[in-house]
Image (cartoon, helix red, strand yellow):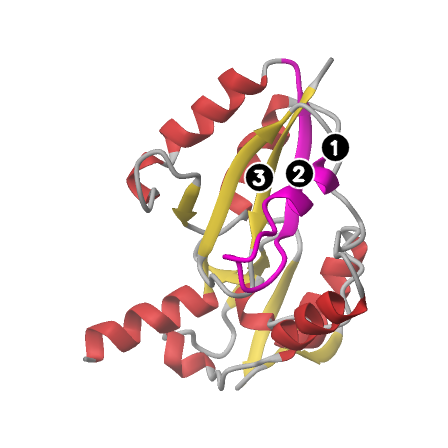
Amino acid sequence: MPEAIYILINQAMPGLVKIGRTEGCVEQRMKQIDTTGVPLPFECFAAFEVENGVVAERALHTAFGDHRIRDRREFFRLSPDKPTAILRAFGGREVTPGQDPVEDESDQRALDKARSIRPRFRFEMADVAVGSVLTSVFDDSIQCKVLEDEKVLFRGEQHSLTSSALVVANEFGKNWKQIQGPRYWKFEDEALVDLRDRNELEDD
């Protein structure tokens, strides 16, 4: 029976992804790890069936070992699109859940509220100039062009980072109503929020 490798994100753990495997249902696994020690439910960025889950998981953990937060833990500080690209190359069937596997409406409200929190962002914070081309963390072939602070040209129309990112997320099966745009657009293969955060650290 094929196993599944999953890439999870959590709104309470910005910049981190959890790379793991399960022999059962991905949604059920997400509910199992949603314990009292975790502030918010996990979200599945991507999940794929693979023939040998142990080998696939080990390959991903090795490939991103330099980004691992702690030995014997499955958390890595990197954008979720990077391990997802490797998973796609394995050629397995995608089994990413379309719905948030929450227990009740209060969990869903908490998750939606966390997604809607949008820290102030301007392109200059990330050293991204007007005219720069951004790529989606969901698919590098999806692009937009920077027009001005938090405004982009996306598919021939002016959008905010947030509205354009939400369109793409919905197209990729994410039944989300809120999103933090700078977390889901990249410049030169790095998420805008990561660029901003690095610049802030350098300024300090």
Image point (39%, 39%), residue name: 73
Whole-percent x, y for residue 121 in the image: 48, 83
What's the distance in space between the residues labelled 1 and 3, CA to CA? 18 Å
In the picture provided, is 170 more to the left or to the right than 32?
right
Task: Tell me if residue 155 comes above or below residue 138 in the rendering.
Answer: below
State which region is magenta.
26-51
Contact flag, marks 2 and 1 (Cβ < 8 Å): yes
Contact flag, marks 1 and 3 (Cβ < 8 Å): no
Q: In the picture, residue 188 is in which quadrant?
A: bottom left
Residue 149 appears in view: yes
Given the image, on which type of amino acid does mark 1 rest? Cys
Residue at disc 3, secondary structure: helix
What residue is shown with label 3? Answer: 84
What residue is shown with label 2? Answer: 29
Instruction: Tell which of 102 and 119 is nearer to you.
Output: 102
Residue 28: in magenta span: yes
Instruction: Tell which of 70 and 176 is nearer to you.
Output: 70
Few, some or many C-alpha atoms within 10 Å of disc 1 (few <14, some 14-19, many ≥20)? few
Image point (80%, 68%), residue name: 105
What's the distance in space between the residues labelled 2 and 3, CA to CA? 18 Å
Whole-percent x, y for residue 4 in the image: 66, 27
Instruction: Tell which of 139 and 109 is nearer to you.
Output: 109
Residue at disc 1, secondary structure: loop
Q: Quadrant of the C terminus?
A: bottom left
The disc, 1 or 3, on the residue closer to the chain's N-terminal end is 1
Residue 24: in magenta span: no
Residue at disc 2, secondary structure: helix
Task: Tell me if residue 79 comes above or below residue 90 in the rendering.
Answer: below
Whole-percent x, y for residue 195 in the image: 38, 67
